[in-house]
Amino acid sequence: MKPARIHYPWLSTLAAITFLAWQFALANAALIPLDRLPPALQGQQNLPAAAALLLLLVMFDIWRFFKANRRCRAQLKQYQEQISELFDSKRELGTRARTYSDHADKLKMFISERLLETIEYDEKFLHFKNIASEVRHNGVISYDKAQTALTRAQQNCDAGEKQQYREAAEGLLYLWDLLDLSTTDNVALHVANQIYDCEEHYFQAQLNEDTEPAPFEPTFMMSHALRRALLPITDDADALGLNQGWPKRGSYVDDKFNIQLRTDSEMLGNVNHMVLLIENLVNNALFYSQQKEHKNRYSRVAISLAQRGGDVEFRVYNRGPRIKEDERDKIYQLGFSSRRIREHHGKGLGLYFVNEITKGFEGSIGFNNIDNREGGFTLSVKLTNGDVFRHEFEIIVANGRPRVLAGDVEAQSGKRLEWSYEAPIASIEASPQASRKPQLISELRAGEDSIHLDAADSQVPRWVLEVKNRKRSSKLVFTPLDVRGVEFVASFETARSRLDNQD
């Protein structure tokens, strides 16, 4: 920008000097001959005109001065604004620099802490691996002695003790296989190699009936692995049917678990590897489902065993925090753990072993985040006196939690809905909008209270009905259940499907 300038008033100054010199010459004619002046200036007859011209020149210079002065002031103001903006930007840059410096320091501290944790974890893991390797190397003789003693004990004991010795032998073998996994450099390859050995013996036995027995059992039943994994963490094994002719198809429920056995499958490989996989998935589910903020009286760790095509499908659901998308691949990494509750920190080994064993079985592992659903709902209530009541309402989700919004009674909106009747309830027909088939709850008797869970998904019920029947009256309470959680899904080829795929 070109700087503004204030010019000196040369015109008025020179005009004033000329005017004064002219008047001086006229006043001192003896000093300066007047004949040297132009004829128009030799007298005072042009004095008004000269004074007027001088005045105009002075006024012109004054106007030009004020104009330049305004331009200078405007430019000075602009410079001041630019200087202020410069100082403001400098202060802002300084503030940003300090903020970024603080963030950089915090980031350095965070990276340093994580790095130290990683180094410490690696050292502990290597130390553990070395210890396991040393235990395995030096414990071979003791292991053989213990297995031999347990085998002889099974042969010489009565029928009541045989089961106990067999489970002890299985537990000792399980411990030995864990030491094998902890000392191997590639868990997935170690598991796969054992499956290939089992596959060879299994195929030979299927193709040649007169083949000599394999030196080890090449197959196992998936339900047997599930039973082995559940026994150590079950409070009441009888409630889950673990000690009564297991396995049987059906449902098994206790305070912790809701198990659905739809089918059973014969698998190739080492049963202990599958037991370890199931144990880690179930223990992970138990940890989150038993936290106070996620636990409720109707939630269970849901386990299902089914078959889809030629694959066996194993599912584990638990109430708890959902897995973030940016952690989808990290959860299987060695040392990564999302457990940050108070002072409890996971070791980052459970899901790592799950993923490696799954790869060894040439299967797949994934998870689904379970959310609450919105939708309309209708209850048709029939009383013993023949009256029928129809209630329509909405299930909404507020802050992630399910709530009920009644269309007829706004005051009843909230966690649950309640209705009172002047006669006992005989039957109820529940019709969720998302389901085409209504659920009928019948054979309700006067004087008996009962609780009825959503039958559309017996493992993850989304609502509960409480019926409080009296002899001459009744009360009905509908409560939507918070089902937010995670469901892990693991899929593996069965022994038969592997054989068919080889043909």
Image (cartoon, helix red, strand yellow):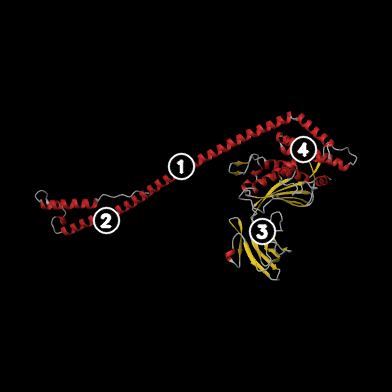
Q: Amino acid at mark 1?
A: Arg
Q: Can residue 236 be seen at all in this image of the molecule?
A: yes
Q: Tell me the SS state at disc 1.
A: helix
Q: In whole angstroms, how far apart are the C-alphas of marks 4 and 1?
A: 64 Å
Q: CB under 8 Å between callouts 3 and 4?
A: no
Q: Can residue 433 be seen at all in this image of the molecule?
A: no
Question: Up-down: is 262 above or below 132?
Answer: below
Q: Decide which of tag 4 and tag 1 comes sooner along the chain.
A: 1
Q: Amino acid at mark 3?
A: Trp
Of marks 1 and 2, the one in the foreground: 1
Q: Tell me the SS state at disc 2.
A: helix
Q: Residues within 10 Å of mark 3 (few under 14, many from 20)?
A: some
Label drawn at residue 463: 3
Label drawn at residue 98: 1
**Residue 178 located left or right of residue 101:** right
Q: In whole angstroms, how far apart are the C-alphas of marks 3 and 2?
A: 89 Å
Q: In whole angstroms, how far apart are the C-alphas of marks 3 and 4?
A: 43 Å
Q: In whole angstroms, how far apart are the C-alphas of marks 1 and 2?
A: 52 Å
Q: Decide which of tag 3 and tag 4 comes sooner along the chain.
A: 4
Q: Amino acid at mark 2?
A: Trp
